[in-house]
Amino acid sequence: MRLGFIGLGNMGSEMARHLRAAGHTLNVYARGERSRAHAGRLGLTPQPTPAEVARVSEVVFTMVTAGADVESVALGPDGIVQSDQPGMILVDMSTISPAIARNVGQRLGERGIAMLDAPVSGGVVGAKAASLTFFVGGEKARFERVKPLLECMGKTIFRMGPLGTGQVTKLANQIAQLACLQGAAEALLFAREQGADAAKVREAVMTGLGASRMLDTLGKKMVERDFAAGIVAALHHKDIGVALEIARDAGLPMPVTAQVMQQLDALMASGFGEQDTSSLLLVLEQMRGKS
């Protein structure tokens, strides 16, 4: 198929690589210097605007940072909406507010362009291995058309319901994930400071009901003091902020998530935003040093 891809960051470039390896024609738009470098590595010459990408594509994938970025590439003066390509499908794989996803989808729909929201879980490691999980919202017929393309990039693909439900699912994933990660950081700090071998404690706890994927993968990074980013902490900070804003507007009590957000705020203020979110352990160590 003739595909478009916008958002050639650390994850997006790997996902685009898999689509190209599957034999699809790829047209890209690179918003920044790093994306242009990734485009060059893939042997691709970027189109001048998102609209130009859309004009030569049957399906366009976007993998950008925030809701404002999605609105810009989809609805801006040179955005996808200007492409005059009825029948085209936009698959947005960013993590953004469900309300923004629905609004962008409605605006594109007025021009005959369909949209699916398809945020991913799995990080750079999953993007490189084509083992990502996709949470997809949108019409079933559109989903079935793009599913084989998603299978080039991921192993587990869920259609969650109408447009926006993919984003709801991804934010629920982040809420659960970060609560477990904060718990892992506190458990390992507690074990170490009480004289136990944190590595052995982690191994033992992983055999019982205290086990979690966060304790397994990021807990290992904490024990080894490897804070190089798998997913940069700034992205988790952004996602939890979106979730809490929605919760406040809906009057939903989320006390644990609110506490985790305070820790993420401290992480960002400490300059750890470009490190892995396992740096929540470093935040706790700083707090202990001040007590």
Image (cartoon, rainbow, N blue to C red):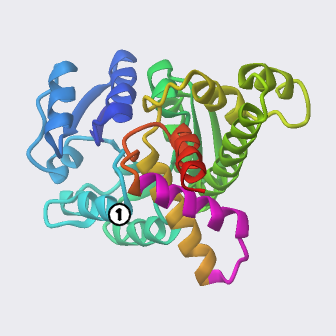
209, above or below 202, in the image: below
> Which element type, helix, strand or loop, lies under badge 1?
loop
Residue 94: percent from left, percent from top: 43, 50
Q: Which residues are magenta?
A: 250-268
Q: Is 89 left, or right, of 172 in this rendering?
A: left
Q: Would you identify the image quadrant in which residue 70 lies?
A: bottom left
Per the image, the residue denoted by label 1 is 112
Q: Main secondary structure of the magenta part?
A: helix
Going by the numbered disc 1, the residue's amino acid type is Gly
**Residue at x 61%, y 60% (from the top left corner):** 168
Residue furthest out toward the right: 208
Question: Which quadrant of the structure image shows residue 10?
Answer: top left
Residue 138 visible in image = no
Residue shown at 31%/57% (left/top)? 86
Give the image location of residue 141, x and y in percent.
56, 49
Place of residue 51 in the rendered image (x, y in percent of width and height, measured from the top left): 17, 53
Residue 78 horizontal side relative to residue 244, left or right: left
At x 50%, y 50%, the residue is 236
> In the visual, does 266 lie left or right of 59?
right
The N terminus: image quadrant:
top left
Query: Magenta stretch: residue 227 in it?
Result: no
- Who is closer to the viewer here, 141 or 156? 156
* Of residues 15 and 267, the one drawn nearer to the viewer in this rendering: 267
Q: Quadrant of the C terminus?
A: bottom right
Q: Residues within 10 Å of mark 1 (few under 14, many from 20)?
A: some
Where residue 85 sits, quadrant-wise, is bottom left
- Viewer-proximal residue among 4 and 172: 172
Which one is in front, 37 or 162?
37
Q: Could you tell whether 230 is left or right of 194 in the image? A: left
Q: Position of residue 233 (x, y in %)?
A: 46, 45
